[in-house]
Each structure stands twice: as structure tokens, then as C-alpha cells.
Amino acid sequence: MTALELAAEVRSGQRRAVDVLEEYLTRIDTHEASIHAFNEVTTDLARQQAQAVDDDVQAGRDPGPLAGVPVAFKDNMCTRGIPTTCSSRILENWRPPYDATVVQKVRAAGAITIGKTNLDEFAMGSSTENSAFGPTRNPLDLSRVPGGSSGGSAAAVAAGFAALALGSDTGGSIRQPAAFCGLVGMKPTYGAVSRYGLVAFGSSLDQIGPFAANVADAAALYEVIGGHDPLDSTSIPDLAPTVLDSIDRGVEGLRIGIVRELSGGAGSVEGIRSDVVDRVQAAAVALEAAGATVEEVSVPSTTLGLSAYYLVAPAEASSNLSRYDGVRYGLRVDAATTGEMNAATRTEGFGTEVKRRIMLGTYALSAGYYDAFYGKSLKVRTLMLQEFAAVYQRFDLLLTPTAPTTAFPLGERTADPMTMYVNDVCTIPSNLIGHPAISVPFGVGHDGLPVGVQVLGPALSEALIFRAAATLEAAAEMDR
Amino acid sequence: MAHLARLALTEAEIDAFTGQLGDILDHAADIEALNVDGIEATSHPLPRTNVFREDTLRPSLDRDEVLSQAPAAEAGQFRVPPVLGESQ
Amino acid sequence: MIGHEPSLPDDWELVVGLEVHVELATKTKLFCGCANQFSSEPNTNVCPTCLGLPGSLPVLNGQAVAFAMTLGRALGCEVRPSVMARKNYFYPDMAKDFQTTQYDQPTNVDGELRLADGSVVGIERAHIEEDAGKTSHVGGGGRIGDANYSLVDYNRAGVPLVEIVSRPEIRSVEQARAYVSELRNILLAIGVSDARMEEGSLRVDANVSVRPTGSQELRTRCEIKNINSIRSMGRAIEYEAKRHVDLYASGESPHQETRHWDEDGGRTTPGRSKEDAEDYRYFQEPDLVPLVPTAEEVAAIDEQLPMLPAQRRHRLTQLAPNSADAATIVVERGQDDLVVAAVAAGADAERLLTRVQNDLAVDDWTKVDAEGLAALIGMETAGELTATQTKQVLAELVNHGGDPRTIAEALGFEAMSDDALAGLVDGLIADHPDEWNRFVAGDEGERRKMQGFFTGQIMKATQGQADGRAVADLLNGRAG
């Protein structure tokens, strides 16, 4: 049953939200120990909320479009009075005095907030192995990673612990785990969803987006969380995040480009596995069959994205993470002076990957290196924006793999950060230029694990990418 | 760098990081080598300007709730070890 | 022109640039809706944003920006497109461990301050930034180095500031004082700050160096902080300049550093050395968007600017070219509108300015109206009232208001006709032939002495109601 169907039944009084919730809690009870999707399951709160939803229905009030739907939140979204840890020791016991805007919106839509999900510490990683509280495992194959950094959210939906989940995507952290767990995951246009209350990683790259088992559910959750927020200066004004009503319109007449640099063939970046390339080709065929024209297109600057990203994101992060200094909240490791206390706290509180990125970002911003690294990366963003703008003169949408491979085994890439970073090559461009993108499962690779294909569109083309995603979803169903 | 970032790294960490950061910066050689003369920097993916709020009061937080999260508090304030050096 | 400091030898010249921080008189802070009010109980005007809580975001206070631009225009600056930047450094009162400020693209550049003595000091920039919280040091006599621990209050964190940076064009302590007092006058005139130095809403740091008189070089400067009043600024600059001269005299040089003014000790003490200064890793604040004022906005600001002190002084000296000093004082007191109106009502401008400067040094002059003042000065000019009588009538006007002629009559100040006075003078000459001869034939000194004698006799005879100048005219006329 989809989340939308579930909400419809709860709204109409056919099912009680409290009963729905207990089914989910039972699954969590049974399987969470082997998966570790959550940092915290907010059982009591969820039960209260479910009861309130049922009370509303009883009293003839509409609880909202997500009535009774259990939703999981990546543990970098602030929840008042509920620990918000970013899977870091440094915030282990922090209870925020406020709710993120998305949390308020999801609650206002009648959803049940079921818990906070595991992530790579401060969202830095692609496998959820960088969590201070232990890795999350892929529910489809427990020896493999769920992807990251929103691996806990992806695993929660894939394991049936939540009907929907929110993740955050700075360089692919929603789309890649969605691909690895066989889900739909979407990164909205920068500014389409409020970042207020999302613990910042790379402020100019971060966006919150939905995970769902199907395209329509993802679209429904996007509609709930999208729209202007006066508390976020980068939020787009007067945005109506309306995507559901056009989701079935198909792709007839759309011009879709396959990005050569991410296609695995000649002129492509290395490391995109052939079985993944095959699925992208199959997706292209399916889109053509649905009436789109598909053709290869070169976007040369995409190959620069990885370098630019691994300078811009750490630079912003190094500044964003300065505030974890042991003064106002979170961990403190005492020392003789405040300066020593700051260093002792941060040294003990941050994991290796976070320290590595803080060091990298500090370096990229430092006097003497700024122009060569950070400054140039910002110009690469301009180049990419210009190239993509030109491409979107000729194409409505672009098609790429979501990740170069399927879910990889735990521990395979932890030793060498660069091999882990390369994993983000297909997803990073959308973050650098702020465009929306969606990952849709499209069959499996030679290892039997799901492959995600990614649909990219220009700024504010959410309705269009959801249409293409729905078309691919339907084709994948037929394939099965 | 580690001091700027207020991190106390061990010798082993410094060695490992130096190598890894070297790899990452090697990868960034493609950017370093790029001719970007005359190209403007993009700090923001979407061009927006002049976003302001009204100069109107919003409720502040409850002090007890705020200080309940502090590692150390005293007399309604955050308590810290002695501070060396002045504010700037 | 402004003279040399007596304490500095003639062969050395003072070179001073001032950095003035001004707190803007907004209702709320720069980036959040907390009250701009930090005398409250500690940590009561705080929210996620000004506490730098994870996930919080800034939104610029439009009024603060408007105030900053108004100040820029009042200082003759160019108001330009600008961006906010992050200045990264660790300090417990800086909640995010970076200060949001402006760096390479400030809002206001290239202005000037025209001082009362006619000199002009260039303004390099006037940029927007946030204030820090307050750290108090407990134990060890409250001194920073000896404290047992410190307490931090964030009520002031995020209060809007404008930092006005002068060029190093100030050449004397008097000029530095005049600069600050002129800046204060402007701030009060345009209403963007209450500009109270003693309460910290106007804070001055002085960059001090010296150079051989006549040289154009800029030598090593020291930044003096902790200056709490205009008086201590003068003392601090004087002390520091002398210290530099002494160092050079003994073959040494000052180090570039921040020094602290010790009010009790009357000296500056070393602080942070610029050599081990932090690398602030400035970069554009990704959570805020650029400020792009339109030409129309700037024009509207110009239109609404009140007449500024320099213009107001000019307006008075146009009317009374010989009363420049009086004009400065009258403008400072805010009595210039009254003076201009009284001149328009017929008062002699020079005499009026002298009278207002000397005899209207009161806090409340609201009962004095322009017509009354003009009538009074007219009576004095016509010789109907002596100087003493005029002062008495003016004092009465200040206390009770009313018509000066009625007051003069009530006080028994009868207009003494020229004939009556001439009669008195002739009588005196007849009674004192020796003195008269000494007046007519004596040298300059003798003549002055005898004029004093006759005037004194007349005053005695008239109980001070005669006009001294008229008596002198009569004596001179009789002497031929």
C-alpha cells in the first residue's frame, strides 16, 4: 500500500492511525537491531500524534494530506525536545529548543513523526558508515551499505519502518541512497524547501527532499515540505510546489539528453559500471517508447564538478561546524582555558571524516590558497550554470546514472576517501548549480541489486522531473 | 591549519590527512589548471537579491530551556573556562 | 587650522585613523527578531539564530540596512551593491564562531567628514556587521588574564552595527575629537543611533602612528582599543604617539599590534600582535543574498536626509561670516533653526549669534520664539537696551516667554534716548576737566583708561542701563 493510499484510508476513517502505527512499530521492533536505521524512535510521541489524528477524523476534522502516515526524519533536522545528533558525539545529547520548518510542515499535514534516522556524521559521507553511532545496513542486503549520507532514512523506508522519510542532499545524499535501496529520492531546486532547522553542512548546496517507495508518494511529500519560508533568506518566494496533479502526463514530445560525460562510454568519467550503464540505456529506450526523443549531449563541465564540490562543500562546512565549541550546547571536554576546551571538545567530538573535511575546507579558504581553490571553484559553478543553461535550450531533461555502481559492501571504501568521493560524481552537478534531480529505481544490476537512474531538469522543473520519473516507474513495473 | 580549526590532531592523523588532502588537491588540479579569466564567481546557485525582514519583534527563547542544554551555566549565563585574549 | 599637540615634538607628526562602531537603533537584531536591548537580564533576548544554534539561519533586518545606507549617504559615501561575509575566528561571545560582516564588498565606500574647523577627513568605508555577546571574567579581580572562569551573555550578540573606517588623515588629538563629535552629531541628526559613547553604543578604536613632519610615509601603526570616552581617546592617542616617538628616538620601532587603553594607568598595554593574527578565512555568507540598492532607493534616502551639521553651520556662516565659532556651538546645541528664523524676522545676524552663543546656553529654550528673539536683538541694536539689559530680558524669555518689550518695561528698563545720554556725557565732561584733558591728549593707554572712567561714571549714574558703546561713541565725537 502506498503512503497516499494509507493517508486516504485514515482520512476516510477506514483505518485508524494508531493501528497503522503499531504495524510499523512492530516491524521496527523485529528488524531494527539488524539494520540500525534510527538514532531514535519516538514511540510515545508517535502514539500521541496517531491518537490525535484519529481524534480529528472522529470529530470530522481533516488531519491533512499525510494523515496517519509515519514519516522518518534524518537526524540533522531539528526536533524540539528530541535529540538531534547529526550522528555525532559532539551533539549526542542535544535537544533543540525549536523545530525545523519541514518538521512543522510534515506534522501540520497530519503525518506521524516516527523517529530520527542515522546518517554519516554531519551528512559527510556516501555510505552511512561515518556515523558515530555505528553504520546502517542496507535492508536489501545486510552486508552492504544503504548509501549515504541519508542512509538511515533510505533504510527506514526500504525496511518498512516508515512510509516516507526526509533526507538532505548536499552532493547526492538523498538520490544515491535511494538508488542503493531501490527507492525514489528527490533533491528539489535550491530554495524550494526551507533549510531552517536543517543542521548545515554546505549551506549553498544543502536541500531537504523526500524518500518514498514510489514516485507519487515522493511527490506528495515534496508538496507538503515545499514553498516559501521567511526564515530562510535563500527560500524562493511565491513558490507553489504543485507536482502531483500533472504527474501522469507522461513524456510525449519531451526532449531528453543523455549526458555523455556520465554515460560510461567514450568521453565519460571512469568507473561507471557497465551494468549501470545498461540500465540507463534501457531507461532511455523506455522514455522513447513513451514518446520522448532521446539523444546524447555533452556537458563537459560536469567532470569538473567533483573537484569543485570537494572544495566548496568542505569550505562552507569548516565554517558551519566552528560553532561546535563546547560553550553553548553539546559535548564539552574540560580544559584549563576556553581555547584549550574548544580544541579538546572538537578533537574528541568529531569523527575522522568530519575532521578531514574541516581541515580541507580550512585549507581551501586560507589566505594564499583561496583564489586557487575556493575562488576557482565558485567560477566553475558559473561555468556549469552557463553550460547547463545552454543545454536546456535544446533539451527539457537530462538522464544519467544516479551512482556509478550499486550498493557496495560495508568497509569496502572506508580506507580511501577519494574512492568514496568519486561515488558522488553523477549527483554533484545538480547541487553545485541548484537544479532539481530525482533518482528512480530502474531494474537491477548484475549483482541483483537495484540500479537508480537520475533525471535532471532546470531550476523549478520539479513537475517535469516527477512526470519523467513516473513514466520510468511505470516502464520498470512492466519490465518486471 | 589544525590550530585555525581548533583541532588537536595526533602525528598519525596529521600524516594520514596530509596524504589524503594531497590526493584531493591533486584531483583538484583540473580546476587549478582551468582558465577562468573573466568568469564571475557564483556563491549562490540561484540569483536572488535584497531579502529582508521587517524590524518587528519575535518571541525569544525561554532561558531555562536554552541553558538546560549548556555544558555549564551560572547566573543565567553560559560558563566557560578562563578566556585568554580579547574579543575582536 | 588645528594646531600641533604640545606633547609631540615639532619634528614629529601624528597620523591617526579611527574605526568607529555604531549600534543602530533598530527594534530588533540584525538577523533575528530578538529585541535590540541588552541591558535586560542575561540571555533573555536570544533565539536559535543569535545563539548560533545548529540549523538556524539569518534573515537581514531591512531597517538596519536602510539605516546603514542613510548613514553612508550622510557621510557622502557611494552606496554600492554589497554582500555579507563570514569572518571566521573562535571566541566564546561569538555564537557561531564566525562574525557575519562585510569584507571586500561593503555597502558604503569613499565618503568624507567635514569638520567644524573646515578640515576634511576621508572615510574609507562604512560597513554593516553584527555585534558579539558579552563575556565577563569572574575572579582574579575581573581581569581577563587572572580570571577563574568567564560568563557569557548573548543578549548583545547579533545587534546591528555599522563600522565607520576613516582614512589615516587625522593629524591631531583635537581633530580626532572633532571627528568623533561631528560623527556623533550626524548620527543624532539622522536618527540611526543614540551614539552614546559611555554606554557603548558608539565605540572608537584608534590606529595611531607618527612620522617625521613633512614626510608622506605611513609608519607602523598600533590599534588602540578599550577607549571609553572622547577624553580617554585624546589621552590614549597622545600617550601612544609619544610612545612611538620615544621608541624611534631610542633607535627602536613600534610593533604592529593591538593595544589596550588602561584608563587608570593612563597608558596603553600590548594585546594581540598582528604578526600572530588569525587568518580569518573570509568568504561570502551563503545563507544571505547580495544587497543591491537601486538608484531610486538611494535617491529616496538623499531626499529624506535632514540638513547635516556641516550644512547647518554653513547656513549660519552665510548669514554671519564673522561668527564661525558661535555657529559651531549653536548648531551643536540645535539652536540653528531658531537663529535662522530670528534673522528672517529681522535680527542682526552677528549680534544674534553672539547673544545666542553666550546667553542661551540652556537646556530648554522652547519658550523663546524667533519673533521675540528678533525683537529683543532689534532693541539691543537700536540702543534701546544695553547688553546687560538684553541678557536679563533674554533670561526672562527663557523662563517664562512673552514679549521682550513688555518684559523690558516691567523690569523698568526705560529706553534712554540718545539726547538724554548725550546730556549726561556733556555734564560729566564739564564736571571732570582734568580727566577730559587726559582723554583728549593722552596716549592710547591713557585714553582707554579715561574712557573707562567716564563709562563707569555714566553706568553709576544710570544704574547700568546705558549702552557702553554709545557712551564711547559720544566721548570720541566730543573729542573730535
Image (spheres, rainbow, N blue to C red):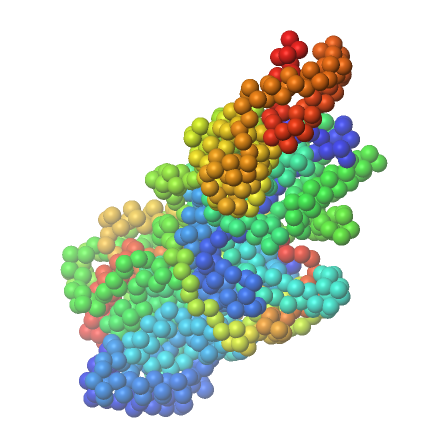
Query: Residue at point 30% right, 48% down?
Result: A389
Viewport quadrant of the N terminus of chain C = top right
A471 versus A5 height, above or below: above
Q: Quadrant of residue C132?
A: bottom right
Say if residue C93 shows up in the picture.
yes
Task: Please give the name of the residue rendered at 26% of the width and 80% of the height, measured from the top-left corner.
Answer: A63
Rendered location of residue C170, percent (x, y): 63, 34
The count of marks equals 0
Query: Left or right: C226 with respect to A28?
Result: right
Judge by depth and name the residue closer to the eye, A24 or C343: C343
**Residue nearest the observer in this picture, A103 or C121:** C121
Tell me if I can see residue A476 in this picture: no
Rendering quarter of residue B75: bottom right
Residue C170 lies, with reference to residue A201, above or below; the image says: above
- Nearest the eye: B44 or A141: B44
Which of the pair C413/A47 is nearer the observer?
C413
Identify the residue at image location x=63%, y=63%: C135
In the image, residue A214 lies at what x, y percent?
26, 74
Left or right: where does residue C196 sit relative to residue B35? right
Location of the C terminus of chain C by quadrant is top right
- Can you say whether C320 is above or below B14 in the image? above
In the displayed orientation, state which residue is furthest to the right. C250
Residue A439 position, x and y percent, is: 31, 66
Q: Residue at x 32, y 50 (%)?
A: A388
Residue C387 versus residue A366 in the image, above or below: above
Q: Position of residue A146 (x, y in %)?
A: 41, 74
